Amino acid sequence: MQECDFKSVKIADYDALVVGSGFAGSVVARELAERRGARVLILEKRGHIGGNMYDEIDGSGVLVHRYGPHIFHTNDRRAFDYVRRFTEWRDYEHEVLADWHGIYIPVPFNKNSMEAVFGTKKAASLIGKLVATFGDERKVTINELRGIEDPELAEIADFVYENVFLHYTQKQWGVTPEEVDPSVTARVPVFVSRDNRYFQDAYQGMPRDGYTALFERMLDHPGIDVCLGVDAESVLGLEFEAGGENAPLEGIDVKGVPFAGPIVYTGPLDELFLARFGRLPYRSLDFRYETHDCDRMLPCGTVNFTVSEDYTRITEFKHLTGQVNDTTTIMKEYPHAYDDPRRQTPYYAIINEENNAHYDRYVQLTRKLDNFYLIGRLAEYRYYNMDQIISRALDLADELCRP
Ligand code: FAD
Ligand code: UDP
């Protein structure tokens, strides 16, 4: 990867411009450089590459994730094969326990959780009912479960709602589970199974040397230059058609030079337009780290606090990375509203009809620019996992590399 100083960059030297160096930006940049021989300039506002996947060694020698714990899981063979090009992988299957009044129960809530909560005898009868109603080894969303009228199943539904979803969701989103889009809680269904894994995808793991090393290799191509610490909003000149605040963009300048090549934008769309229609709502997080003088603190990678505490979960990175070290570092996640873009990071789009329409107003401003591409969790205002972004980036690269 060639890091360069934006002040000395000659824009005419580049065929494509990419804003952001997470998976969305980095995969497209690599593909354009490799498959089209393009000279690609990446602008990244942070002081490092890798987007939210960025990891680094902390003061006590532990490899930690700086923007939330990232576990790779997918059923998409193409996405997995793609990232395997750049690193060896460590086999890792994530498990999560909920701290329920000091008792650990597996999440997603499953047959083992039922036994821990209701005892073996009662659990056996409830499991029988669940299997008869939904089938064995089936995943059932909390909303589906709450829709069943049988009194015994209603008891499980109420229990799971109250003890797994309610408090956690209120912390994470600031509202009740009924008020979030159903797709959000559906990510963590009740699982009629003894499988304690958080994900059941065919391919799961962690990059052996960490995500930052993966990104360094992905961006290590003579056609790619990266400018760190450059906020695209302050260097892109937007030219609009005449006609007021809804008039669409007709061109983008970089350093005063109109840029005709592909511009791949992966940041928040409202920021590009200086929030002219108001800020898009997001949830943000604070991460608090603690280092402890012992090998391991937690029984598994993540413990969710579903009935207590004001943080949602604690992650112990050594479970994820397999790192051997005398000390261990854990991280607590404190969710909050996103109301100060200068100091906070937009982590989760708040999906609902109103916000989607708000986002669409911004998209309409870009509709006439045929060299401008929105891709990524921020730019598309969606709740995407890494593998989905890699897949979308490969699709976009195919489109851009078509003769
Ligand atoms: P990002 O990684 O956010 O990258 C966008 C980049 O653009 C950033 O580097 C940003 O600094 C830069 N940028 C933004 N605006 C500008 C600008 N104006 N100028 C220049 N640069 C700019 N997914 C999983 O599959 N597994 C997990 O376990 C998982 N855990 C997660 C935990 C948390 C707490 C969060 C928030 C997300 C998690 N994800 C997980 C999702 C994952 O982070 C995203 O799918 C992934 O980051 C999307 O990549 P991206 O490139 O779209 O965005
Ligand atoms: N959730 C919950 N309790 C849990 C785990 C998840 O209520 O123990 C809900 C919560 O609303 C959360 C959503 O399910 O935001 C999705 O959880 P996931 O673990 O997928 O969130 P992420 O890892 O993306 O933050």
Image (cartoon, helix red, strand yellow):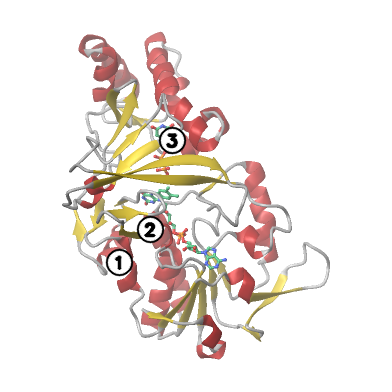
Closest to the observer: 341 or 81? Answer: 341
Q: Callout 1: helix, strand or loop?
A: helix
User: Height in image: 285 above or below 158?
Assistant: below
In front here: 216 or 351?
216
The amino acid type of the residue labelled 1 equals: Leu
Determine the residue positioned at 52% across, 68% down. 45
Q: Earlier in the sequence, mark 2 or mark 3?
A: 2
Q: How many marks?
A: 3
Mark 1, residues whose alpha carbon is within 10 Å: few (<14), some, or many (≥20)? many
Rounded to the nearest whole Å, what is the CA distance between mark 1 and mark 3? 30 Å
* Quarter residue 387 falls in: bottom left
Q: Are marks 1 and 3 in contact (CB under 8 Å)?
A: no
Q: Earlier in the sequence, mark 1 or mark 3?
A: 1
- In the displayed structure, 92 sits above or below 106; it is below
Kind of element beneath mark 3: loop
Question: In the current view of this chain or complex, which residue is farthest to the right?
Answer: 243
Query: Is residue 143 something one can see in this rendering?
Result: no
Amino acid identity at mark 3: Tyr
Residue 245 position within the rendered picture, expressed as x and y whole percent measured from the top left: 79, 62
CA–CA distance in space, label 2 to label 1: 10 Å
Q: CA distance from mark 2 to mark 3?
A: 21 Å
State which image quarter holds ligand 1. Answer: bottom left
User: Which circle marks residue 311 in the picture?
Assistant: 3
Query: Is label 2 in contact with label 1 (beta carbons under 8 Å)?
Result: yes
* Image quadrant where one finds the N terminus: bottom left
Residue identified by numbered label 1 = 214
Q: Amino acid at mark 2?
A: Met
